[in-house]
């Protein structure tokens, strides 16, 4: 219970604030999201990569992400084949289970649980997952509809991509950033996490609680919250990963479905009701599963 009150509850309360404000004021979420995507997140990403000591651990993070993604995709393909689901349902299942909410849920939890060192790893993993999501997520949502072309465009339209490139170039060529400029970046970066947490609460307020397909939701919930961290644990055992990074990756892999993926499902009509339902249920149930996982890893 200590873990719940000290780590999980503060995060949930911020989500709740966003949820209640959206129910009350009906704020236009895309406008708020654009501020977070185009201004706040790039500053946080730039600061993280510019100040981080890049080493082999980041390479292992990439390997971990790729193996986990394809393991979950294969599981969904096998399950969809056995159940004889159409391609659209298979795509919806992959969207809901292969992509986790490392941004406005995972990063805050890890910050509270493991401090700034863990948070730096979490932000790096967040960027990597965003790139993977923008490519594979868009592909599975828009499969058969120029998916790869749209996915590649999405990756290069993401400001965080350029923030990583600029930070790595500045770091590689030992470019010293002026103190006043870094102070500005710091101020904006510090506002990023609470903002994206509030946005998630606002997004959850828009999900409709009706016409649930409970069998598919149960499957998606088990894969996302239970099977995914188990697979993640197996991958970390096979790689020489730092103990702190191991915890960050396992906890990140146990996060609920990514809220962003709902937008892809809606945009490309890839089972949007199913994807949003799994997103909602995994977010609610993760209150228990994340608490238990943090306790086990402690």
Image: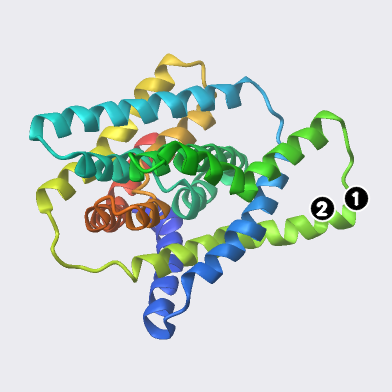
In the figure, residue 146 lies in which quadrant? top left
Residues tagged 2 and 1 counted as in contact (Cβ below 8 A)? yes
Residue underneath mark 2:
182
Q: Is residue 35 above or below residue 110?
A: below
State the image coordinates of residue 270 (x, y, percent, origin top left).
28, 50
In the figure, residue 31 lies in which quadrant? bottom right
| Quadrant in which the C terminus is drawn | top left
State the image coordinates of residue 110 (x, y, percent, origin top left).
50, 46
State the image coordinates of residue 164 (x, y, percent, origin top left).
68, 40
Q: CA distance from mark 2 to mark 1?
A: 6 Å
Residue name at image x 12 percent, y 54 percent: 213
Q: Residues within 10 Å of mark 2 (few under 14, many from 20)?
A: some
Q: Secondary structure at mark 1?
A: loop
Residue name at image x 44 percent, y 72 percent: 18
Most foreground residue, 50 or 98: 98
Q: Which mark is residue 26?
A: none
Residue underneath mark 1:
178
Residue name at image x 34 percent, y 48 percent: 257
Q: Residues within 10 Å of mark 1 (few under 14, many from 20)?
A: few
State the image coordinates of residue 154 (x, y, percent, origin top left).
53, 46
């Amino acid at each position: 219970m200590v873990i719940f009150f000290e780590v999980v509850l503060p995060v949930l309360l911020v989500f709740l604030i966003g949820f209640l404000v959206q129910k009350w004021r009906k704020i236009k979420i895309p406008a708020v999201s654009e501020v977070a995507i185009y201004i706040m997140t790039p500053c946080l990403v730039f600061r993280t990569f510019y100040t981080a000591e890049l080493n082999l651990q980041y390479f292992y993070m990439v390997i971990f992400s790729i193996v986990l993604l394809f393991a979950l995709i294969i599981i969904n393909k096998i399950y969809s084949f056995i159940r004889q689901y159409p391609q659209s349902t298979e795509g919806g299942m992959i969207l809901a289970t292969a992509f986790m909410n490392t941004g406005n849920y995972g990063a805050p939890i890890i910050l509270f649980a493991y401090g700034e060192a863990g948070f730096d790893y979490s932000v790096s993993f967040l960027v990597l997952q965003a790139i993977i999501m923008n490519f594979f997520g868009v592909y599975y949502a828009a499969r058969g509809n120029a998916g790869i072309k749209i996915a590649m465009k999405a990756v290069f339209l993401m400001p965080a991509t350029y923030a990583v490139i600029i930070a790595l170039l500045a770091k590689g060529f030992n470019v010293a950033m002026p103190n006043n400029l870094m102070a500005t970046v710091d101020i904006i970066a510090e506002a990023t996490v609470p903002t994206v947490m509030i946005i998630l609460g606002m997004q959850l307020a828009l999900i409709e609680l009706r016409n649930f397909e409970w069998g598919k939701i149960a499957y998606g919930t088990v894969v996302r919250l239970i099977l995914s961290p188990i697979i993640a644990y197996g991958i970390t055992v096979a790689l020489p990963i730092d103990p702190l990074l191991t915890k960050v990756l396992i906890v990140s892999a146990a996060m609920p479905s990514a809220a962003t993926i709902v937008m892809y499902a809606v945009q490309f009509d890839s089972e949007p009701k199913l994807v949003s339902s799994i997103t909602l249920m995994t977010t609610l149930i993760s209150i228990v599963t994340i608490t238990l996982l943090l306790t086990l890893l402690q």
